Amino acid sequence: MGEFITRVVAIDPAAPDRTTIAEAASIIRAGQLVAFPTETVYGLGADGLNPIALRRIYTVKGRPPDNPLILHLASRDQLPLVAADVPAIAQRLVQAFWPGPLTLILPKTSCVPDLATAGLTTVAVRMPAHPVALALINAAKTPLAAPSANRSGLPSPTTAQHAFDDLRRRIPLILDAGPTRIGLESTVLDVTCIPPIILRPGGIAREAIEAVVGDLQEVMNMAQRQRSPGTRYRHYSPRARVWLVEDAQAETLQATVAKALQHSKRVGCLLHRLEPHHLPPLVEVIHISGSMADYAQGLFAALRGLDGLGLDVIVVEGVQEQGLGVAVMDRLRRAASPPSPSPGFTE
Ligand code: TXA
Ligand code: MG
C-alpha cells in the first residue's frame, strides 16, 4: 500500500468548491481513494468500475474480501448502468427515498466488476443525499464504490477526524463537510425477492418502507443472513468491552454499572433517556438526550470518544426497537457482541 500524506480539506456542503471537487475527482479517476461525506457516515470512495481501485478499498480498510460494496450514484437515471433489472417495487422505493439512506440490492450488469460485489450476481446501489457526495460522483463521471471510511471493525466515521484517525497515511484526501446528519449507515434492502427483505437496518425505518410497498419479509433466518455478507462480521466495536443495558431501565443500568465497577475502575457510560445523576462517579459519562435521531446521530462519535479514554468497560443504554431504534439497537448489539453473560444486559 502506498504511503500518503493525508490532506483534510474543508468543503462547504451548501456550495461545494468546484476546484476541490475537481481535484478529488481526478484522484478517483486515477484509481486512488478519497474519503467524502454522505448524509449517513463518511464513505471511502473509489471508481466503482475500476478493479484496481476497488482492490485498494479492501487493502486500506483491512476489509474481508467476501464483503461487497455499495455503488453510489448521482442520479436515478444512472441505475440502468449498474442494475440489469429494476422491478416496479424498486422503482417506487427509488421515487420515495432517493436521494437518501436506502440501499437497494438488484441484479447487476456486466459493467460491474466482481470486486464490487464480492462475486455475487447482485449489486448494492444508493443515491446519497449530500451535495458534496453528489458533486464528487458527477465530477468523477463514474459510480463511486464507498464503504464506510473506517478501518474494518471500528465504528463508522461520522466526522472527517474519525476517517483521518483510521486512514491517515493510507489515502491522499479527506473532504471535510462537518459531522454527518444521520450518523448511522443506510438501510440495505434486498428487492430481488418478494416481499423484499431488510438485510441491514439503517437510516430509513422499516415502517417508512412498508408505507410505500407494503409488508416486508420477517426477521432473517441464518440462510438469508448469508446474503448480506457484511452482517456476519463483528462491527462497530470499540476496543473496550461494551455492556448493553437492553431494557433501558434505571435499575438495570445501576446494577450493570455496579458490576462493571467490580471488574475495573475504568468504566464509562453512554446514556440517552436515563439521567446520569443516579450513577456513582465514573471516568466519563456521555449523555445524548433528545430524540432517537439525536441518539443515532451521536452514537458512533460517543463510542469512539469513550474508547479513546482507554476504558475497560463502556455501559450503554439500549432503546426500544421502533423506527430508527431498530438500527440503533442493531449497532449497539454488534458493538456489544459476543452476547451476554447474564440476563438484563449483553456484553
Ligand atoms: O450509509 C451507507 O450505506 C454507507 C455510506 C458511505 O454510503 N456505506 C456503507 O457501506 O455502510 P459498507 O460497505 O460499510 O456496508 C455495505 C453493506 C454491507 O453490509 C454489505 O454486506 C452489504 O451492504 N452489501 C453490499 N452488496 C451487497 C449485495 N450484493 N448483497 C447483499 N448485501 C450487500
Ligand atoms: Mg461499514
Image: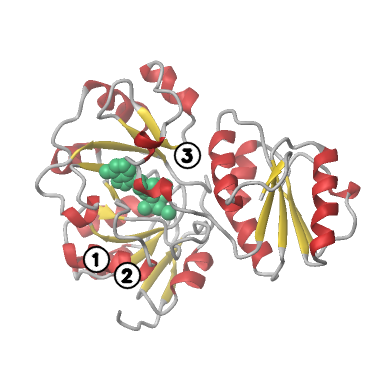
Q: Position of residue 277 (x, y in %)?
A: 89, 49
At label 2, counting other C-alpha atoms closer than 10 Å, the crowd grade (few under 14, some 14-19, many 20 or more) is some
| Label 1 neighbour load within 10 Å: few <14, some 14-19, many 20+ | some
From the viewer's side, name the closer residue of 236 and 290: 236
Q: Is residue 330 left or right of residue 199?
A: right
Asked if the beta carbon under badge 3 is closer than 8 A to the nearest atom of ligand 1, the reply is yes
Residue 58 at x, y percent in the picture: 31, 65
- On whether ligand 1 comes within 8 Å of the CB at mark 1, the answer is no
Residue 9 lies in quadrant: bottom left
Q: Amino acid at mark 3?
A: Gly
Residue wearing tag 1: 55
Q: Is residue 290 above or below residue 67?
A: above
Q: Is residue 79 visible?
A: yes
Reading the image, the residue beneath label 3 is 202
Residue positioned 63% across, 57% down in the render: 303
Sequence-first disc among 1 and 3:
1
Residue identified by numbered label 2: 59
* Quarter of the rendered image showing ligand 2: bottom left
Q: Earlier in the sequence, mark 3 or mark 2?
A: 2
